[in-house]
Image (cartoon, rainbow, N blue to C red):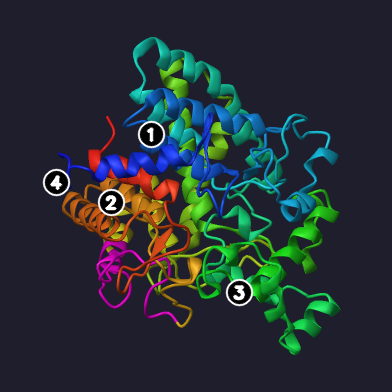
């Protein structure tokens, strides 16, 4: 597969976005809206940078491990020094936890486990001696992270990791999470605020809506619910085994576990290159994850869904995550064919500017509100990776071309309308720029 035609300065414009958001060894997602370092953002950024500056890409990965806890956990956020963000820091207060690093402040939850995937891509781009040294450096840290995921978030050894907050899943406000969040018992003050519609006054205290219109962001009510949940899990030291089932939101998230299956494969490939062994107990968990993803399939609708970790019931609200098990080549040929047909349905996912985060025939679809329906370049990239894994080369080329055409036309926005292509959220968004660089080059070696 060759590179796609593009205007001469398209890649240069993408690189300028990454340069403007650079903060030393790491890159923030957006200078105004997201000034800190986020886990999966840095992974996607590193994947793109591997195409143009492998050494900087390696530094992006290394910088993530500044925040790794002694127990192996990789936090979804590392706070930037000198940035006033007292609200977020007050939520987490990581310095109170014995396992947290002492020299940086972090969140106390994780995010989709893409570091092994990104590390493998970066290593492929590094010259020989640097490649080996980089992999030797990151491999034990990656193993520690995967150990933590299975030890602390797969308590029943079923192979699926349980998430304790929507901020962990990456696709924060997608309908499955918001439905379960709204079913969570609310404190009296939140019930009062919702009943009398007092949540509209929260906009005066929000920082995200200073930079983007409120209709493009999570609603104030959803935001308050997420803060309530964060406070509850904080009361139990963010430990799954301590959380009360009746007042928590515990989900075996589809997207997260699909990324985990792919990351496990990357970790095994790194171990093979280094001629190192991963302990059998961990590799058994890897195989369980691949098998357990199939438990999230619903035969009637022909889709994958997340699962309520307490009731065991599938949360049958469709999202773009249904295609992500393709990345790990988990679905059978028959199921993969059904997913490809679903993806190409113009009344659901094959919109004018695909792929929407929520299908357009869903009651929850909203083309401009965060994860309620817009097209995101990172999920398009993941769908392309899945299509490539199952040999759908024509569809790979088409979705790749349409994604790049969208970004070239509208700019490096955080997300885009699947209906008219208009960009929303943060401007000059780093993973949009980085994955543009990756998509322009075609498949990694």
Q: Which-is-in-front pick, marks 2 and 3?
A: 3
Number of other residues with Cα within 10 Å of mark 1, as a class: few under 14, some 14 to 19, many 20 or more: many
**Percent of width and height locating residue 329:** 35, 46
Picture disc at residue 122: none
- First in residue order: circle 3 vs circle 1: 1
- Residue at image mark 4: 5
Q: Which-is-in-front pick, marks 2 and 4?
A: 4
The answer to whether residue 198 is left or right of residue 134 is right
Q: Which-is-in-front pick, marks 1 and 2?
A: 1
Q: What stretch is highlighted in magenta?
A: 338-362
The answer to whether residue 245 is left or right of residue 357 is right
- First in residue order: circle 1 vs circle 2: 1
Is 387 above or below relative to 208? above
Near-viewer residue (193 or 393): 193
348 in magenta: yes
Q: Report helix, strand or loop for mark 1.
A: helix
- First in residue order: circle 1 vs circle 4: 4
Number of other residues with Cα within 10 Å of mark 4, as a class: few under 14, some 14 to 19, many 20 or more: few
- Residue at image mark 2: 387
Near-viewer residue (319 or 306): 319
- Residue at image mark 3: 219
Q: How far apart are marks 2 and 3 (CA)?
A: 33 Å
Q: Can you tell which quarter of the image residue 8 is in?
A: top left
Picture disc at residue 49: 1
């Amino acid at each position: 597969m060759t590179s796609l035609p593009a205007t001469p300065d398209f890649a240069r414009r993408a690189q300028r976005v990454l340069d403007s958001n650079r903060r030393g060894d790491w890159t923030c997602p957006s200078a105004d809206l997201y000034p800190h370092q986020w886990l999966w953002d840095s992974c996607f950024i590193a994947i793109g940078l591997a195409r143009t500056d492998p050494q900087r890409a390696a530094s992006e990965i290394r910088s993530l491990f500044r925040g790794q806890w002694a127990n192996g956990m990789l936090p979804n956020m590392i706070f930037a020094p000198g940035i006033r963000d007292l609200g977020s820091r007050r939520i987490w207060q990581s310095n109170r936890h014995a396992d947290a690093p002492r020299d940086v402040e972090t969140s106390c939850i994780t995010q989709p486990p893409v570091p092994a995937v990104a590390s493998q891509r970066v290593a492929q781009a590094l010259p020989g001696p640097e490649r080996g040294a980089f992999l030797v450096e990151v491999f034990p840290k990656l193993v520690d992270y995967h150990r933590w995921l299975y030890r602390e978030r797969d308590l029943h050894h079923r192979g699926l990791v349980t998430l304790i907050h929507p901020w962990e899943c990456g696709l924060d406000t997608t309908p499955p999470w918001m439905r379960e969040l709204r079913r969570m018992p609310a404190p009296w003050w939140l019930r009062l605020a919702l009943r009398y519609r007092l949540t509209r006054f929260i906009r005066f205290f929000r920082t995200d809506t200073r930079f983007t219109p409120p209709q493009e962001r999570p609603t104030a009510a959803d935001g308050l619910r997420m803060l309530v949940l964060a406070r509850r899990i904080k009361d139990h030291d963010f430990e799954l085994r301590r959380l009360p089932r009746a007042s928590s939101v515990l989900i075996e998230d589809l997207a997260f576990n699909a990324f985990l299956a792919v990351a496990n494969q990357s970790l095994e490939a790194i171990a093979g290159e280094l001629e190192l062994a991963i302990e059998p107990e961990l590799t058994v968990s890897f195989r369980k994850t691949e098998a357990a993803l199939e438990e999230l399939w619903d035969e009637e609708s022909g889709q994958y869904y997340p699962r309520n970790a307490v009731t065991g019931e599938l949360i049958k609200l469709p999202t773009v995550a249904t295609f992500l098990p393709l990345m790990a080549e988990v679905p059978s040929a028959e199921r993969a064919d059904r997913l490809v047909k679903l993806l190409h349905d113009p009344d659901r996912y094959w919109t004018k500017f695909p792929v929407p985060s929520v299908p357009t025939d869903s009651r929850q679809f909203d083309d401009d509100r965060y994860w309620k329906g817009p097209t995101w370049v990172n999920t398009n990239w993941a769908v392309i990776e899945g299509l490539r894994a199952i040999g759908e080369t024509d569809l790979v080329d088409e979705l790749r071309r349409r994604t790049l055409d969208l970004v070239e036309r509208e700019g490096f926005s955080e997300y885009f309308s699947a209906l008219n292509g208009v960009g929303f959220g943060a401007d000059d968004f780093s993973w949009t720029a980085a994955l543009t660089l990756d998509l322009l080059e075609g498949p990694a070696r």
